[in-house]
Image: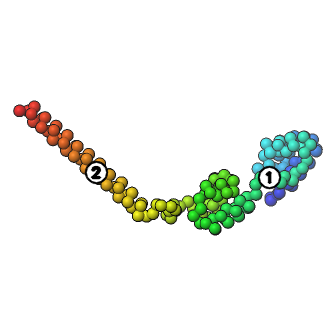
Amino acid sequence: MDTSKEKILHILQFFFDKGENASQAAENVNSVYGPDTVTANHAQFWFRRFRSGNFDVKDASLSGRPIVENVDKIMEIVESDRHVSTVSIVQELNIAQKTVWNHLNKIGYKKKLDRTKRGPNTDSDHFLVMAKVRDKIIHRCKRKATTRLKTWTSDKLRNEERIQ
């Protein structure tokens, strides 16, 4: 049976006014509206509220920052510059970086590496750096191979000298 939260809370308030305890109220509600409609702990929570004098069963308005405004502002920034960093969005809107990532993921943006470089670094600079790294690796490998060969031959000579 589909029942609203507010209706169940009014029923719990009725049992509170009647003088029953929270566990009995939860059992009665579950026997009428189906198992697991309300737990004993939930009924106890509401009974404590009723005892303190708070009989308001409507949901209190939620406080906090409006999410829609954050999403709209993030979208404006991303639409103006698709290659904007999350750090710059965080600094501009003064919100947490995880919040920015969550909103971008919900919108459908994924984390990708930006290939465009700003400043003096260009693709040719990148290739020069990679060539230097490659040359250093090759030189190091040749040096190790030469050292191993020298060590092997000197060991071989020492062994031959011992035998003779």
Mark 2 / mark 1, whichever is N-terminal? 1
Task: Give percent across and percent down for residue 23.
Answer: 83, 41
The residue labelled by disc 2 is 139
The total of numbered circles placed on residues is 2
Is 74 in front, or is 130? 130
Describe the colour scheme in one phrase: rainbow
Answer with left or right where residue 56 lies relative to residue 114: right
Is 105 in front, or is 16? 105
Query: Which kind of residue does numbered mark 1 sit on?
Result: Ser
The residue labelled by disc 1 is 63
Residue at the image point whose x is 41% and y is 64% from the top: 124
Report, in whole angstroms, how far the alpha carbon at label 2 lies from the one at label 1.
64 Å
Does residue 8 appear anywhere in the picture?
no
Answer with left or right where residue 97 lies relative to residue 159: right
Residue at the image point whose x is 69% and y is 53% from the top: 94
Query: How packed is label 1: few (under 14 Cα within 10 Å), some, or many (20 or more)?
Result: few
